[in-house]
Amino acid sequence: MSSRRKPSRRTRVLVGGAALAVVGAGVVGTVAASAADSTGAPRPPTWPTRSSTARTAAAPAAARPGDLTRSSHLTVRAAEKAARAALDAAVKDGRQVSVAVVDRDGNTLVTLRGDGAGPQSYESAERKAFTAVSWNAPTSELTGRLAQAPTLRDIPGTLFLAGGTPVTAQGAPLAGIGVAGAPSGDLDEKYARAGAAALDR
């Protein structure tokens, strides 16, 4: 039987308290060390500056009503309707064409490449539509301007061949419809006009 005596309860409490004091001192020392810089000097607390607070709370700038303009844009549904009408008119005549509809800014809204349409017709239709809305005139009329200003054809994205027609709202250009692939530009423009006419129905 062992002769060692178990420590009394009072002794265990005192020993446990001393251990906690040592651990606590280590934690305090760690916190104090983290709050000091490399020279050992304590770091001051960091508070948000007035300028950073102002940037966070700043409201977005609002334009004045007098500095704004309003413009109308063709919906995608209307563009699809016009493109389908143009393609249907060509198919009815047995023509294989591509159709493009662009918005007021010349961005393509819809393109339809008919069955059997040539690979060149896709881009040509887009460029005709872009040209028509840019000058707010049918491309068949614009080809006549090249005699006086031949450098017009150098403008990127344009194609001065018959087959494009603008869509207007209160006289202002709203969109352009271009058709390419028929045997002649006159036929291409006939189908483009059919697409524009569908928007009146």
Image: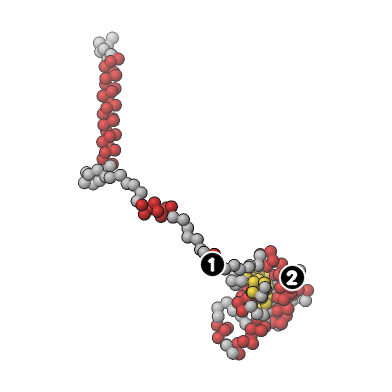
Q: Which mark is residue 10?
A: none
Quarter of the rendering occupied by the N terminus: top left
Identify the residue at image location x=22%, y=44%.
Answer: 41
Disc with the residue nearer the chain's start (2 vs 1): 1
Residue 109 is at least partly visible in this image: no
SS class, disc 1? helix
The amino acid type found where label 1 is placed reads Gly
Pick whichever, 86 or 174, lies toward us.
Answer: 174
Pick whichever, 174 or 92, lies toward us.
Answer: 174
Quadrant of the rendered image containing residue 129: bottom right
Residue ranking furthest to the front: 66
Identify the residue at image location x=67%, y=72%.
Answer: 169
Q: Which mark is residue 200?
A: 2
In the image, is 45 to the left or to the right of 108? left
Pick whichever, 68 or 153, lies toward us.
Answer: 68
The residue tagged 1 is 66
Count neighbours of disc 1 (C-alpha within 10 A) and say few if under 14, some if 14 to 19, many if 20 or more. few
Where's residue 166, x and y in %?
Answer: 66, 76
Where's residue 197, x and y in %?
Answer: 74, 73
Q: Which color scheme is applied?
A: secondary structure
The amino acid type found where label 2 is placed reads Asp
Quadrant of the rendered image containing residue 85: bottom right
Where's residue 23, x and y in %?
Answer: 28, 30
Residue ranking furthest to the left: 39
SS class, disc 2? helix
- Total tally of numbered discs in the picture: 2
Quarter of the rendering occupied by the C terminus: bottom right
Front: mark 2 or 1: 1
Separation of disc 2 and disc 1 at Cα? 33 Å
